[in-house]
Image: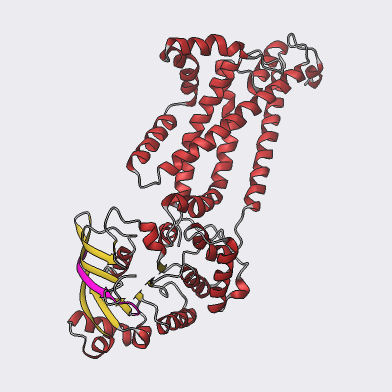
Amino acid sequence: MDWKVFLEMAPSGGMTYLGWLGSGVVWTLTVSSFAWIIASLVGGFVGVARTTPVPWLRAIGTVYVEIFRNVPLLVQMFLWYFVMPEVLPKALGDWLKQDLPNALTLPFAAQFSLWELTAAILCLGLYTASRVAEQVRSGIESLPRGQTNAGLAMGLTLPQVYRHVTLPMAFRIVIPPMTSEFLTIFKNSSTALTIGVLELTAQSRQISEYTFKTFEAFTAATLIYIVITLTVTFAMRALERRVAVPGFIAQAGGH
Amino acid sequence: MTDPQSPMIDLRAVSKWYGAFQVLTDCTTRVKKGEVVVVCGPSGSGKSTLIKTVNGLEPFQKGEIIVNGVSVGDAKTDLPKLRSHIGMVFQNFELFPHMSITDNLTIGQVKVLGRSKDEATQRGLKLLDRVGLIAQKDKYPGQLSGGQQQRVAIARALSMDPIAMLFDEPTSALDPEMINEVLDVMVDLAKEGMTMMVVTHEMGFARKVAHRVIFMDRGAIVEDCTKDEFFGTARSERAQQFLSKILHH
């Protein structure tokens, strides 16, 4: 074993192999965080849409979930990156492939462009949104129907019932399953390497190819992934405790 | 307000189906201002469904319901506005678990009636005091017993200054020793002249304060008579059977 390999200068980027690893971490965190923002916003809306009594909203939600959930993530990566610019109007497609990459140079010796980054974030975010939507939907549906009735009976409108009654409780109920989705997004962000985003997994592979220190390279990646996911787990547990309702015991399926 | 002689709640030949299954059949009855009407009947007889049609929580397909002069089934009716005048108490209390007791009492007043937070809190706490739970104002529903939660739920409904109250089996989910604390609050309300429609099996409550008793079976109103008639000479065989079952055990 030779851990000192990380202190050697890498062939590009003007940094050590440790620098490459660090760059990988930065892009893993970047892709995952932006994708998570998209996933929770879109997933939240789609999940709520599927619980409303409005038929066309439910239909849109169902179609969204079934499309994004049922196509392999890797295939979706390729669709966003290779296929989307071709099916869009030519001017827009060209802009994505030619102008967006030059819009700004990414920092941290990125070796890829804003277009790869955007495609990866959109793909991972919208895919995860379909999974988040299902968690949100089941969270809302696990609340007793009587809660909605009680809100309506006092004269709240349906949007007010969602805002003040259903969603605050559903939010608390879905924290544990959301933690698991949040962890998955960090792990799934490694698929971005297939469209050229040099995130943590890609950098480890690169280090291993240049140095033949395969064991060290992937052990480092493994440890870093574990540190990231444990941090997320602890943060989500803290959030769970912070918003816990006094005296409320999660009652799957209601009374 | 409408003509004092016209009924507060007026159900005219209300029918409802779940698919092909008819849950309500031609239900017709009236509740006058200040009247206390108890609705009873075996489980599955449609009493809860009937009471929920009154404030539009359950849609119905035929007939008409007029509450305080407003047609509930009319698509143009502002249902939230209508509901804000009709208090409702549920079998499972349905307090909002993530809100303190005080917030439970004020949310409707603030969001629906547009009262200021201060005014709403004052009104809410006064009613909380009335149901004997002022000491619990900062607690959460999960920290209260069932009987206490239901008393808060009644105070919450009253905080909206309702013109009538609907009770959907308010004591059915309670442990026996807690039933009376809730019934006491309801008896007081009835004595003050609140218009009440109460789905319950508590025949003691019916005897004490009801003006009329409605007996339902298989989605239809079988008996609709004064309390004395009901407990004296309930005419239908089904009602007699029902009474003998719940009064002698």
Q: Quadrant of the C terminus of chain B?
A: bottom left
Q: On screen, B63 above or below A218?
A: below
The N terminus of chain B, quarter of image: bottom left
Is residue A220 found left or right of B198 in the rendered image? right
Q: Is residue B90 visible?
A: no
> Which is nearer the eye, B154 or B247?
B154
Q: Is residue B165 left or right of residue A24?
A: left
Q: Position of residue B132 (x, y in %)?
A: 56, 79
The residue shown at (27%, 89%) is: B228
The answer to whether residue A202 is magenta is no
Image side of residue B25 versus residue B46, left or right: left
Q: Position of residue A59 (x, y in %)?
A: 35, 38
As for residue B25 lying within the magenta part, the answer is yes
Between A221 and A139, the one nearer to me in the picture: A139
Q: Position of residue A120 (x, y in %)?
A: 55, 22
Q: Which image quarter: residue A9? A: top right
Q: Is residue B104 left or right of residue B249?
A: right
Q: Please name the residue shown 40% across and 30% down the image.
A: A67
Residue at 40% x, 42% y is: A50
Q: Which region of the structure is painted magenta? A: B23-34
